[in-house]
Image (cartoon, helix red, strand yellow):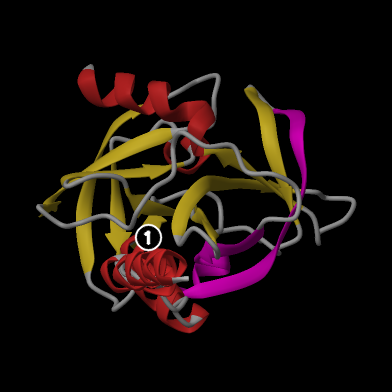
């Protein structure tokens, strides 16, 4: 009995020491959970703000454009023209100045200047005039590299019947029109619903959206005066440059 009691006591003491010295399982589990837990990281989503320029009022655009649009007068013809570059060159139709050496240039505010006819084509209805006093003046923006499509909103500027500062609004109603009037050949014309009349010839066609001159007003349909035709600048860019360089 004594031996049995001593044995049981030794077993109980060993179990007690094991319990005391062994770390609790729950503590180990908590420690491991703390080591593996990662706090969530929040990333700020970037905000993109698109800044769009407010389109200018059409009346403001036309007023700016008309500063570069002129009445062209010779003793036998009256037409229109516009400033092409800062070297004092004006572009107009050849039929406005053909056979002439000089012309009177009238600005939108009524000032008159003498212009020298530098060159005009006998086949294509394009001419250039030089005005010394216009050197250094900034022209209205031109679009000489792009073709415009049917539906483009346009404004025809010029001086029909000698009346300065006129503007008629319409659209490009068709493209790639071909005409022959007298000796002049017209290819890939813009057909427009913006009304043009005698005296508008040589004036610019303005794109409302682009706010640039895109063509030269050249003719109207005699059977239907509501239809006009304009020569795209992209078609005559090289011709104008050749005229300037050779004169």
- Residue at the front extreme of this rendering: 1
Residue 138 or residue 73, whichever sits in front: 138
Q: Main secondary structure of the magenta part?
A: strand
User: What segment is highlighted magenta in the picture?
Assistant: 153-181
Q: Which residue is depicted at the point 29% across and 76% down?
A: 110
Q: In the figure, 203 relative to 15: above or below? A: above
Is residue 46 shown to the viewer in this render?
no
Q: In the figure, 83 relative to 159: above or below? A: above
Other residues around mark 1 within 10 Å, as few (<14) / some (14–19) / many (≥20)? few
**In the picture provided, is 178 more to the left or to the right than 93?**
right
Q: Position of residue 126 (x, y in %)?
A: 47, 33
**In the picture provided, is 109 more to the left or to the right than 187?**
left
Is residue 70 shown to the viewer in this render?
yes
Q: Which residue is depicted at the point 75% across and 55% down?
A: 151
Q: Which residue is depicted at the point 67% across and 26% down?
A: 187
Q: In the figure, 117 relative to 47: above or below? A: above
Q: Position of residue 188 (x, y in %)?
A: 68, 29
Q: Position of residue 232 (x, y in %)?
A: 56, 38
Q: Is residue 217 magenta?
A: no
**In the picture provided, is 227 more to the left or to the right than 68?**
right
- Residue at the right extreme of this rendering: 223
Q: Position of residue 68 (x, y in %)?
A: 32, 62
Q: Which residue is mark 1?
A: 36
Quadrant showing the C terminus? top left
Q: Is residue 177 magenta?
A: yes
């Amino acid at each position: 009995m004594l031996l049995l009691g001593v044995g049981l006591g030794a077993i109980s003491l060993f179990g007690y020491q094991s319990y005391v010295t062994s770390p609790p399982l729950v503590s180990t589990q908590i420690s491991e959970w703390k080591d593996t837990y990662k706090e969530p990281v929040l990333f700020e989503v970037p905000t993109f703000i698109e800044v769009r320029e407010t389109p200018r009022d059409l009346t403001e655009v036309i007023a700016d454009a008309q500063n570069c649009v002129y009445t062209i007068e010779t003793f036998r013809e009256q037409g229109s023209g516009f400033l092409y570059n800062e070297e004092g060159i004006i572009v107009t139709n050849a039929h406005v100045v053909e056979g002439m050496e000089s012309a009177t240039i009238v600005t939108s505010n009524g000032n008159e200047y003498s212009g020298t006819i530098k060159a005009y084509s006998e086949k294509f209805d394009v001419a250039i005039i030089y005005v010394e006093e216009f050197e250094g003046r900034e022209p209205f923006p031109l679009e000489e590299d792009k073709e415009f499509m049917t539906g483009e909103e346009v404004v025809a500027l010029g001086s029909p019947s000698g009346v300065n500062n006129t503007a008629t609004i319409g659209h490009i109603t068709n493209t790639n029109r071909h005409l022959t009037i007298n000796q002049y050949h017209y290819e890939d014309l813009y057909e427009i619903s913006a009304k043009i009349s005698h005296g508008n010839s040589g004036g610019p066609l303005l794109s409302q959206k682009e706010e640039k001159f895109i063509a030269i007003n050249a003719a109207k349909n005699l059977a239907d005066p509501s239809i006009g035709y304009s020569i795209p600048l992209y078609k005559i860019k090289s011709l104008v440059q050749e005229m300037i360089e050779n004169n």
